[in-house]
Amino acid sequence: MSRIVYVNGEYLPEEEAKISVFDRGFLFADGVYEVTSVLQGRLVDNAGHLSRLHRSLSELEMDAPASDAGIEAIQNTLIERNGVQEGLVYLQVTRGAADRDFAYPEGVKPSLVMFTQVKNLLQSPQAERGISVITTRDIRWKRRDIKTVGLLAPSMAKMIAKRAGADDAWLVEYGQVTEGSSNNAYIVTRNGTLVTRQLGNEILAGITRKAVLELARTSDLKIEERAFTVQEATDAAEAFITSATTFVMPVVSIDGQPVGDGRPGPVTRRLRELYIRTALQEIGD
Ligand code: PMP
């Protein structure tokens, strides 16, 4: 049975879903996206994702394609029609279709596309074992705070990691880690301080990052929001990443060097457990 996807007002089998060749998402990567995880058939922290969607849209002077309630209704319809218990809903807004011109066209309707993916999020071998990362130069543009569909640089970084036999890449600029190719990056120093890069144009403000930092704060962990070097990361006691689909994922090796004892550390494991427990509580309410 094929998946039902949503395209500009219609629910269609994926083979029938089409978008114009003049769509600016296709021609200019002129579009933004969000990924919300699904647990027990319910959206996790969707309000945060919709609020970041608005920020991305407004930074690009793009209109919202529907109200928040309208978008959430479509997300929930897709979850239901595709029977998703665990996985994600992907949503993409582009400026729409117009004759090719660099300047933003006027009076064009934005395109809205959404689809679901089934994925094991709670139980994963990677979460048990931890992942390996390599570091590579951050060659992305200078507005990484906008969640655009211009994702070629992170795709290249993932391929560099894959060819090196690693699970993912951490991106480095001026000797400091910005973030992971599709996630935020953290270390726990040997004296137990949680360090992650401060928000700014250099990284994406992760919705999971916000939730995890709040949980860390309430657990009395010492937190420093600042840039850290690759050396600090390889010297750290623990390392991990966060994103909507990985939650809190341990990083157990960086550039082939084990982090700590090479196994997921206690702070990372506790934050993963806390994050999952809180997410399940929130969707249960
Ligand atoms: N940074 C980048 C570059 C990302 O692509 C993502 C995932 N979309 C994140 C951070 C994590 O954001 P979130 O927790 O909202 O998924």
Image: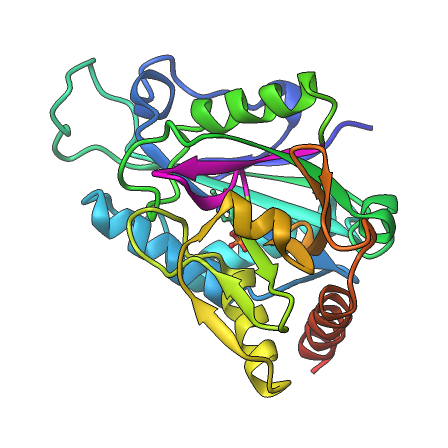
| Residues drawn in magenta | 167-182
Q: Nearer the viewer, residue 124 or 52?
A: 124
* Residue at 88% in and 45% down: 125
* Viewer can see residue 118: no
Measured from the top left, where is residue 278 in percent x and y?
Answer: 70, 77
* Residue at 60% in and 80% down: 221
Q: Could you say which quadrant of the image residue 274 lies in?
A: bottom right
Magenta stretch contains residue 169: yes
Q: Could you say which quadrant of the image residue 214 lies in?
A: bottom right
* Viewer can see residue 174: yes
Measured from the top left, where is residue 137 in percent x and y?
Answer: 44, 28
Position of 12 with respect to 81 (left or right) is: left
Q: Could you say which quadrant of the image residue 46 lies in?
A: bottom right
Does 241 sit above or below residue 8?
A: below
Q: Main secondary structure of the magenta part?
A: strand
Magenta stretch contains residue 247: no
Position of 112 with respect to 184 (left or right) is: left
Position of 245 with respect to 35 (left or right) is: right
